[in-house]
Image (spheres, helix red, strand yellow):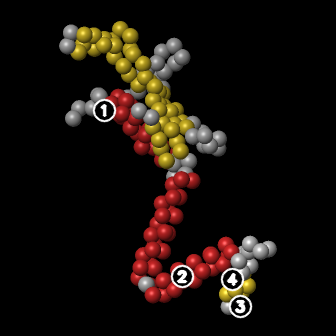
Amino acid sequence: MDDVVTYTAPGDELTDWFDARDQARREREKAWEEKNPEASKFRKAKHSRSRRGNAYLSRPFVALDSEGQDVLGNAILRGERPYEDHQIFMWGAATINETLPAYWLVHPETTNNSERALDPLAVLEWLVALPEQYPDATFVMFSFSYDVIHILKTSAF
């Protein structure tokens, strides 16, 4: 054990260099805190906030997405060029946590052979209700601007 540095603190024998280093650091911090009580309170509060702030990392992620398609035979003219009307037919919210079910929003009259476009107000109500279904979740979306455009395009403002 020639490579082990021995450090002896009053009343405590430490044989490991790492323990000695940690002990010396704790003693320096304690001395600093005694000399700087206000700064010490601020530093402790800051670290406490950062621990609370990191709590979101343990929250479940819930992915949201919508699906749309062109409504054939319902062309919209932009200038002289016709475009098929594009509508949103389904929204979904899901997480990889198997204990939390996926939630879907489809028009009540939608069938396998006939999709009905969703009312933007119904979509907004569904979105606002999601935090009740997934408490403490972090909601994530991909290309959410597409979804927002389809919610707002029928709004008069």
SS at mark 1?
A: helix
Identify the residue under disc 3: 11
Element assignment for label 3: loop
Name the secondary structure under disc 2. helix
Name the front one of labels 1 and 2: 2
**Mark 2: few/some/many CA within 10 Å (<14, 14-19, 20+):** few
Looking at marks 1 and 2 on the same chain, the residue that comes earlier in the sequence is marked by: 2
For the residues carrying marks 4 and 3, which lies nearer the camera in this image?
A: 4
- Residue at left 74%, top 79%? 15
The spot of residue 134 in percent (x, y) is 53, 46
Q: Is residue 36 left or right of residue 82?
A: right
Tag 2 residue: 28
Q: CA distance from mark 1 to mark 3?
A: 72 Å
The three-letter amino acid code for the residue at tag 2 is: Arg
Give the quadrant of residue 95. Answer: top right
Say few, some or many: other residues with alpha carbon within 10 Å of mark 4 (under 14 / 14 to 19 / 20 or more).
some
Which tag is nearer the camera, tag 1 or tag 3?
3
Tags 3 and 2 touching, CB below 8 Å: no
Q: Earlier in the sequence, mark 1 or mark 3?
A: 3
Which amino acid type is marked by label 4?
Tyr
Q: Which residue is mark 1?
A: 152
Amino acid beneath label 3? Gly
Distance in Å between CA atoms under marks 1 and 2? 59 Å
